Image: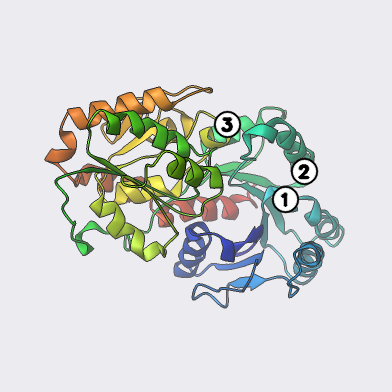
């Protein structure tokens, strides 16, 4: 089997590229030829996969680069369907319409190649979400009419995206996973700090992801005498988070750190007491599958997370692997404060820093290999009537 995977993504800009590289490596282990096509912001990085990662375009100007990439996607897709048979072309929602010329030629020349759309995220800006979803469906509706299958990152995302459409569709869910070889607790020695409770988050730092909310949630606990250090690491999207820390003199306990390589994250997780996923109850996060969740579990941690579908679909409504807090659309800060206080007061974080059941959970269900197999099996079945 051969898969051509197109994403409108500047892969050199992201701090966690696991979805792409882990899927490609899983394909190589199964003798599947997976070719990945993308663009770049500053430079072409191949992540030791030069024969699988294909950058479409050469131009550096951002506007010309955009035009060049989209034209080359059309050309490359046409080239594939004219020269190859029984391959899968997989695209994200931004590239659906660019596949239509190739789709028509595929039908005319009876090449029997299959087209699927892979949805990993919905729009993430709360202020423009409704308008952005209208735009999303203007693109997505073409796949409903012409494509052979659909893949989604979570069951709830599939339900949310597909609810306007009638009929039966071939679909698969493959979520975020984890490399249990890299995220392996026995490779790392915990640096003990008995004086403070360290809360930890890594990933994009933004208002919409709740990173300011967790700061505001810890503030009253600090004032009440709790010894807490909050460490958040990643690309800062909203500068007002840094401004808030400075204006309120929080830097002694509230740390914003620049992104580090993925290989450095496991040690940071080992050293923390409680990973925090402070996502507000907003649709983009309800349908998501955060990679960092699987990484925390793989390192034997229990996590603090909102009780919404992106987590209940993983753990169920009740679970010993997660500290749920109830959130609302308007303000989740009080609920976060109360839950953090309850966890610290229970002294459960002092008793155990490694939970083998957390690691066993992801090893059994959420390795990248298992997620890749679900997609590959689905692709193979596209030719079954």
Q: Earlier in the sequence, mark 1 or mark 3?
A: 1
Residue 244's mark? Answer: none
Instruction: Give the residue drawn at x 54%, y 35%.
Output: 287
Quadrant of the rendered structure where residue 208 is?
Answer: top right
Disc 2 from disc 3: Cα separation:
19 Å
User: In this figure, which residue is indicated by the disc labeled 1?
Assistant: 94
Q: Which numbered mark, 2 or 3, is in the foreground of this view?
A: 3
Residue 263 drawn at (x, y percent): 36, 65
Residue 306 drawn at (x, y percent): 41, 30
Q: Nearer the viewer, residue 8 or 61?
A: 61
Number of other residues with Cα within 10 Å of mark 2, as a class: few under 14, some 14 to 19, many 20 or more: some
Quadrant of the rendered structure where residue 319 is?
Answer: top left
User: In this figure, which residue is indicated by the disc labeled 2?
Assistant: 139
Residue 348 drawn at (x, y percent): 17, 34
Residue 123 drawn at (x, y percent): 65, 40
CB contact under 8 Å: marks 1 and 2: yes
| Drawn side of residue 361 relative to residue 61, left or right | left
**Quadrant including the C terminus:** top right
User: In this figure, which residue is indicated by the disc labeled 3?
Assistant: 283
Q: Secondary structure at mark 3?
A: helix
Instruction: Give the residue drawn at x 64%, y 59%.
Output: 9
| Drawn side of residue 199 relative to residue 311, left or right | left
Q: Earlier in the sequence, mark 2 or mark 3?
A: 2
Quadrant of the rendered structure where residue 150 is?
Answer: top right
Instruction: Give the residue drawn at x 47%, y 62%.
Output: 22
């Amino acid at each position: 089997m051969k898969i051509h995977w197109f994403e409108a993504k500047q892969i050199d800009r992201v701090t966690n590229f696991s979805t792409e590289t882990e899927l490609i490596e899983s394909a190589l282990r199964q003798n599947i030829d997976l070719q990945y096509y993308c663009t770049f912001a500053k430079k072409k990085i191949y992540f030791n996969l030069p024969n699988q990662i294909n950058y479409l375009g050469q131009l550096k100007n951002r506007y010309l680069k955009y035009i060049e990439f989209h034209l080359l996607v059309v050309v490359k897709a046409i080239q594939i369907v004219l020269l190859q048979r029984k391959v899968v072309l997989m695209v994200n929602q931004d590239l659906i319409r660019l596949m239509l010329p190739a789709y028509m030629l595929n039908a005319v020349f009876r090449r029997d190649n299959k087209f699927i759309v892979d949805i990993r995220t919905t729009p993430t800006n709360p202020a423009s979400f409704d308008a952005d979803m209208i735009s999303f469906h203007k693109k997505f509706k073409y796949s409903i009419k012409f494509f052979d299958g659909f893949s989604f990152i979570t069951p709830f995302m599939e339900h949310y995206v597909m609810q306007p459409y009638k009929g039966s569709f071939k679909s698969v869910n493959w979520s975020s996973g984890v490399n249990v070889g890299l995220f392996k607790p026995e490779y790392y020695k915990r640096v003990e700090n008995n004086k403070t409770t360290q809360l930890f988050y890594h990933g994009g730092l933004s208002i919409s992801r709740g990173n300011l909310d967790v700061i505001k949630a810890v503030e009253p606990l600090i004032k009440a005498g709790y010894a807490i250090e909050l460490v958040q690491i990643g690309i800062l999207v909203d500068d007002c988070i840094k401004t808030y820390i400075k204006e309120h003199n929080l830097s002694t306990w509230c740390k914003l750190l620049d992104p580090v390589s993925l290989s450095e994250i496991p040690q940071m997780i080992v050293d923390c007491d409680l990973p925090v996923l402070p996502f507000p109850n907003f649709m983009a996060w309800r349908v998501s599958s955060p990679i960092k969740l699987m990484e925390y579990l793989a390192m034997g941690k229990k996590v603090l997370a909102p009780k919404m579908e992106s987590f209940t679909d993983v753990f169920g409504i009740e679970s010993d692997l997660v500290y749920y807090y109830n959130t609302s659309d308007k303000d989740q800060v009080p609920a976060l404060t109360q839950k953090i206080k309850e966890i610290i007061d229970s002294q459960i974080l002092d008793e155990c820093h490694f939970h083998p059941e957390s690691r066993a959970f992801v090893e059994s269900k959420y390795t990248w290999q298992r997620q890749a197999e679900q997609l590959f099996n689905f692709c193979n079945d596209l030719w079954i009537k």
